[in-house]
Image (spheres, rainbow, N blue to C red):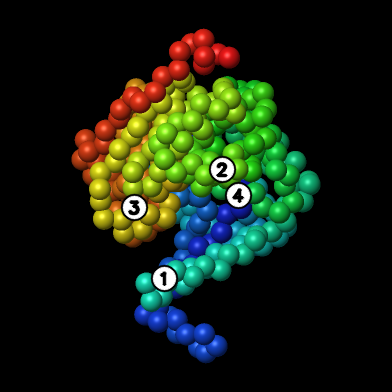
Amino acid sequence: MILTITLNPAVDISYKLDRFSLDTVNRVHDVSKTAGGKGLNVSRVLKQLGEEVAASGFLGGSLGNYIRTQISMQGIHNYFVKTHGETRNCIAVIHDGQQTEILESGPEIMDNEADEFLEKISDYVQKVDIVTISGSLPKGLADDFYNKIVEIAADYDTPVLLDTKGKLLVPTLNSGNKPYLIKPNQDELTDLFGKKYATETQIVEALNSPMFTGVTWVVVTTGAQGAIVKHGQIIYRVKIPNVEAVNPVGSGDSVIAGFAAGLSHGLADEVLMKYGLTMGVLNAMEEKTGYINPEKIDWCMEQISVEKISKRDDKEGNT
């Protein structure tokens, strides 16, 4: 079983309008509501891949109950911890070829709730093969909270795949217990190092930073170009097919789902990279966020190329 963690989930509400007018009434007939959050996108894709999945984080109030009901209907095990506050709404108004978002910050997590979550995680990580952690932290949690989860998982040799912004990566990268895989995009690399990484050469330079020492997989997604991936001391270029992107939102989460599922089945390195990136491509081809068409997996994997572009020798890699 794979455990996904979304500490600040939301009910994602989408309003589609032909035109959006300010300071007046806008009536909308095309509405969708989804149990949202990056980790729940990971959960949905994993379910579509036939994996057994549990989801955890914090849920509160009526919106929290809505999410519990939704994931139960989707066959996802509910490992969420109750919080006193109300789970947030995140609203997207799609209009005139644009998307305007209104994002609530979510509840503030109390110290006793954080302690309860960590206690339960100690139990959960013993029941699963892999843990994924995705997204931002809710109010009330310190920036090193993800590091605490990684440390607990390390006690039971449970690998962690961490997908979050640069600021929240730093505590785990500077700790003795590293996540097994991280998936920064180019913007998150910039956030992490404080300088822009726009070219392949610059990304390779970043991947050779001592900061990533001890992280088995570093997957830098580069949008429609694919990804630059470091595994051990080898760096790969992974090119994806050119497809019509209907909705690229959630593609990064889908990549995490693909790597989690592939790792759980022991896929060989190059096959694993193709499998992981395939999920991102297939998500972009669907209108719904966190959805893929499993019937297209074989086709997409055949269109993806993996090329070794750099290898540090053992002496250099161990310095």
Residue at 40 percent across and 82 percent down: it is 19
Question: In x, y percent, where is residue 298?
Answer: 23, 37
Question: In x, y percent, where is residue 302?
Answer: 21, 35
Q: Amino acid at mark 4?
A: Ser
Q: Earlier in the sequence, mark 2 or mark 3?
A: 2
The answer to whether residue 56 is visible is no
Residue lying furthest top in this view? 315
Crowding at label 3, few (<14), some or many (≥20) Cα neighbours within 10 Å? Answer: many
Residue at 30 percent across and 30 percent down: it is 306
Q: Considering the numbered disc 4 on the image, is that residue within a helix, a strand or a loop?
A: loop
Residue at 31 percent across and 48 percent down: it is 282
Q: Amino acid at mark 2?
A: Lys
Mark 1 or 4: in front is 1
The residue singled out by tag 4 in the image is 136
Which of the labelled discs sits on residue 195, or is there none?
A: 2
Mark 3 or 1: in front is 1
Which of the labelled discs sits on residue 18, or is there none?
A: none
Crowding at label 1, few (<14), some or many (≥20) Cα neighbours within 10 Å? Answer: few
Foreground pick, 225 / 245 = 225
Crowding at label 4, few (<14), some or many (≥20) Cα neighbours within 10 Å? Answer: some
The residue singled out by tag 1 in the image is 98
Q: Amino acid at mark 3?
A: Ala
Q: Considering the numbered disc 3 on the image, is that residue within a helix, a strand or a loop?
A: helix
The residue singled out by tag 3 in the image is 284
CA gap between label 3 and label 4 equals 22 Å
